[in-house]
């Protein structure tokens, strides 16, 4: 009865294991740009979710529609000069820019705001020790993203949603009416959000009307 492996059999097993490892390990390596896209997609959907559960209609405020939930990109000094984004809902006064009291709270950590850096205060400055945002939302520092672009049905640096989850383009603070034709800014063709690294790019499509978002691989 054979009770042990021969040296030749052991060598053969080691060689086969090495070949399998060489095939499997590369496929398990992380891709920072794809990780950034997955996170961004999740937060676009979360912004839409907030908009749908938090109807901003207020009969006593004829500019209520300017306070809808939105996701805005930023790449200034307070984000360390690289792309970041913020989820917020503008309060009356409607400046179009987020302040610490207007930014969504991280549902996993109530002490953190959902921003990767924005101007206005040291609390929103990712380079400050007073920063109370989420460094993971700073796409440049966390994932090596060097640029972003919104095109197709959207433009500028932000995307918003109404209470039905429909995507809206542009700066809400400059709108003049909620549902008047030509002023409501509903996206009528697919919005493409592209993020870039030094060697690659990846895009997310937000569908017109439904707001359904997906990564384009």
Image (tube, grey):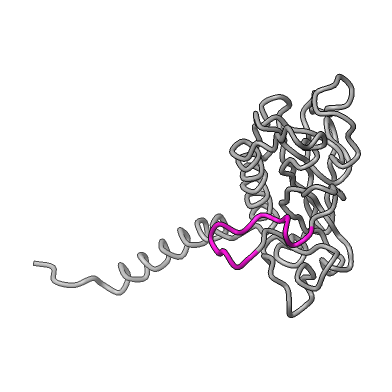
Question: Which residue appears farthest toward the bottom when viewing the image?
Answer: 129
**At 72% across and 40% down in the image, what residue appears?**
204
Q: Is residue 169 left or right of residue 163?
A: right
Q: Compared with residue 2, is residue 149 higher up or lower down, i.e. above or below?
A: above
- Foreground residue among 5 and 92: 92
x, y percent for residue 74: 84, 56
Residue drawn at x 84%, y 68% is 78
Closer to us: 130 or 207: 130
Please provide percent x and percent y for residue 160: 75, 39
Compare residues 204 and 187 and report the one nearer the observer.
187
Left or right of 54, for residue 190: right
Q: Position of residue 89 (x, y in %)?
A: 73, 48
Residue 13 vertical position relative to residue 103 in the rendered view, above or below: below
- Residue at the limit of the structure toward the front, as seen here: 60
Please tell me in which quadrant of the rendered image residue 99 appears.
bottom right
- The answer to whether 18 appears left or right of 140 in the picture is left
Q: Residue at x 77, y 28 (%)?
A: 190
Quarter of the picture holding the C terminus: top right
Q: Main secondary structure of the magenta part?
A: loop
Q: Residue furthest left?
A: 1
Query: Measured from the top left, where is residue 85 in percent x and y?
Result: 76, 55
Q: Residue at x 78, y 41 (%)?
A: 159
Q: Is residue 72 magenta?
A: no
Q: Which residues are magenta?
A: 99-112
């Amino acid at each position: 009865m054979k009770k042990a492996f021969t040296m030749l059999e052991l060598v053969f097993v080691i060689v086969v294991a090495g070949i399998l490892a060489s095939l499997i390990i590369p496929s398990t390596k992380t891709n920072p740009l794809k990780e950034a896209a997955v996170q961004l997609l999740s937060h676009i959907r979360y912004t839409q979710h907030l908009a749908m559960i938090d109807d901003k209609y207020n009969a006593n405020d004829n500019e209520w529609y300017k306070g809808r939930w939105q996701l805005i990109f930023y790449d200034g000094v307070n984000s360390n000069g690289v792309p970041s984004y913020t989820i917020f809902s503008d309060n009356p006064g409607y400046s179009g820019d987020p302040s610490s009291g207007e930014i969504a709270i991280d549902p996993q950590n109530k002490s953190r705001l959902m921003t990767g850096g924005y101007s206005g205060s040291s609390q929103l400055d990712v380079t400050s020790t007073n920063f109370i945002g989420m460094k993971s939302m700073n796409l440049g520092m966390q994932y090596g993203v060097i640029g972003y672009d919104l095109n197709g049905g959207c433009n500028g640096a932000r995307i918003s949603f109404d209470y039905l989850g429909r995507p809206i383009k542009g700066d809400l603070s400059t709108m003049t009416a909620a549902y008047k034709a030509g002023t409501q800014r509903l996206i009528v063709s697919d919005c493409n959000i592209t993020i870039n690294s030094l060697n690659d790019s990846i895009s997310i499509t937000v569908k017109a009307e439904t707001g359904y978002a997906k990564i384009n691989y």
